[in-house]
Image (cartoon, helix red, strand yellow):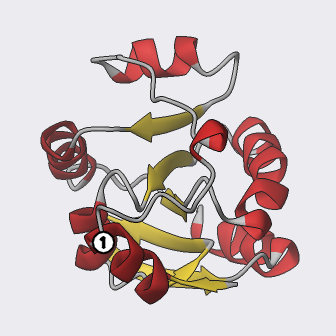
Amino acid sequence: MFSVRPMLEKKQRSHDFSWPMQNIKMAPNVSTPQEQYESSKGSRVISFHSTSKWKTHFEASKRTNRLVVIYFTATWCGPCRHMEPLINNFANLYPDVEFIKIDVDELMSVAEMFVVRTMPTFVLIKRGDVIDRVVGAKKDDLQMKIQKHRI
C-alpha cells in the first residue's frame, strides 16, 4: 500500500524531474464510456480521464441499483499494477457490476471526494452511497465484498 500524501507533495514541486517520465502512459483521448470500453483492449473496466465526464457518469449511476466498484490507482503504484489483471478478471466474472478505474494523479479531486489516502483503494457504491471499501491489494477481501453487495 502506498500513501497519497508523498505523491501530492511531489506533484506540487513542479521542478522535480527525478521520477521516471518514460514509465508514464498517456491516457487515450476518449469521450464516451463505449469508446473507453473499446480503447481498453476488451476490458470491461471504464477509465475516466476527465472530472466532468466522471461527474456526469456518477450522477447517472445514482439512478440505478447497480453495484459500482471504483478502483483508485496510480501508474507508479506497484500493488496497483499487481491488481490490474485481477480487476479485469472480476469485471468479466461479474458483468452485473460496473468497474471504474480512476488514476489519482489525473483526477485528484475524485480521490479527495472519496477520501482516498492509500493505493490501491476500492470503493463500492450503490445509488451514489459508499457501502464498503477495501484498502490495499486484498483480492480475496475485494471479491468477498463484491459478492456480498452485488445482489
Q: Is 46 placed left or right of 140 in the picture? A: left
Badge 1 density bin: few <14, some 14–19, many ≥20, Cα 10 Å? few
Q: Nearer the viewer, residue 105 or 112?
A: 105
User: What residue type is disc 1 on?
Assistant: Arg
Q: In which quadrant is the C terminus drawn?
A: bottom right
Residue 88 pos. (x, y %): 75, 41
Quadrant in which residue 126 is drawn = bottom left
Q: Tell me which corner region of the image, top left, top right, bottom left or bottom right, holds residue 115.
A: bottom left
List x then y, in percent, for residue 109.
21, 66
Q: Residue 130, image x and y in percent? A: 36, 79
| Image position of 26 (left or right of 110) | right
Q: Residue at x 56, y 59 (%)?
A: 74
Kindly identify the residue that appears in the image at 19 percent across and 43 percent down.
60
Q: Does residue 5 appear in this view?
A: yes
Q: Mark 1 sits on what residue?
A: 13
Number of numbered tags placed on the structure image = 1
Q: Quadrant of the N terminus?
A: bottom right
| Residue 39 image offset from top left, x and y in percent | 55, 14
In this view, the residue in front, 33 or 60, is 33
